[in-house]
Amino acid sequence: MRSQSGALVLAIRRIDGNLIAGPTGETRILERDALICMGTAEQLRDLNQILGPINSKSSPRVPKKK
């Protein structure tokens, strides 16, 4: 995902509370995982677009532009 958005995924918090620090490109992202990411506002918006649900009733949170 870093190559597509520029944002870095630092960790993944699973729904059961398990924390995966430093996930690799082989780490699967599961439904309801929480991603802990770092990047510029633009990079995080791009990552959100890549990961955002296709048919969501609520829009994903997007960092505000300054």
Image: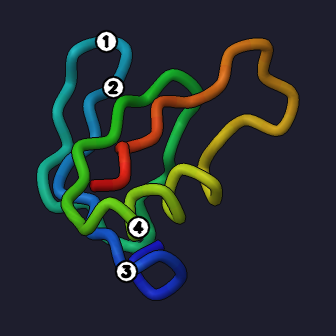
**Residue identified by numbered label 3:** 6
- Cβ atoms at labels 2 and 1 below 8 Å apart: yes
Q: How far, Cα to Cα, is label 2 from label 1?
A: 5 Å
Seen at 43% across and 29% down, the residue is: 33
User: Which residue is pictured at 36% across the width and 44% down the height?
Assistant: 63
Label of residue 14 in the image: 2
The answer to whether residue 21 is above or below residue 33 is below
Q: Earlier in the sequence, mark 3 or mark 1?
A: 3
The numbered disc on residue 42 is 4
Q: Is residue 25 left or right of residue 24?
A: right
Q: How is the image coloured?
A: rainbow
Q: Please, what secondary structure does the residue beneath circle 4 have?
A: helix
Q: Give the mark toward the camera: 3 or 2.
A: 3
Q: Nearer the viewer, mark 3 or mark 4?
A: 4
Decide: marks 1, 4 in contact (CB < 8 A)? no
Q: Nearer the viewer, mark 4 or mark 2?
A: 4
Q: CA distance from mark 3 to mark 4?
A: 9 Å
Image-based side of 57 in relation to 8, left or right: right
Crowding at mark 2 (Cα within 10 Å: few <14, some 14-19, many 20+):
some
Residue type, mark 3 in image: Gly
The amino acid at mark 4 is Glu
Earlier along the polypeptide chain: callout 1 or callout 4? 1
Question: Front-most of 55 and 65?
Answer: 65
Identify which residue, 61 or 21, lies in the foreground: 61
Q: Gap in Å between the C-alphas at discs 1 and 4?
A: 30 Å
Q: Does 25 sit above or below residue 64?
A: below
Considering only order in the chain, which callout, 2 or 3, is on the residue closer to the N terminus? 3
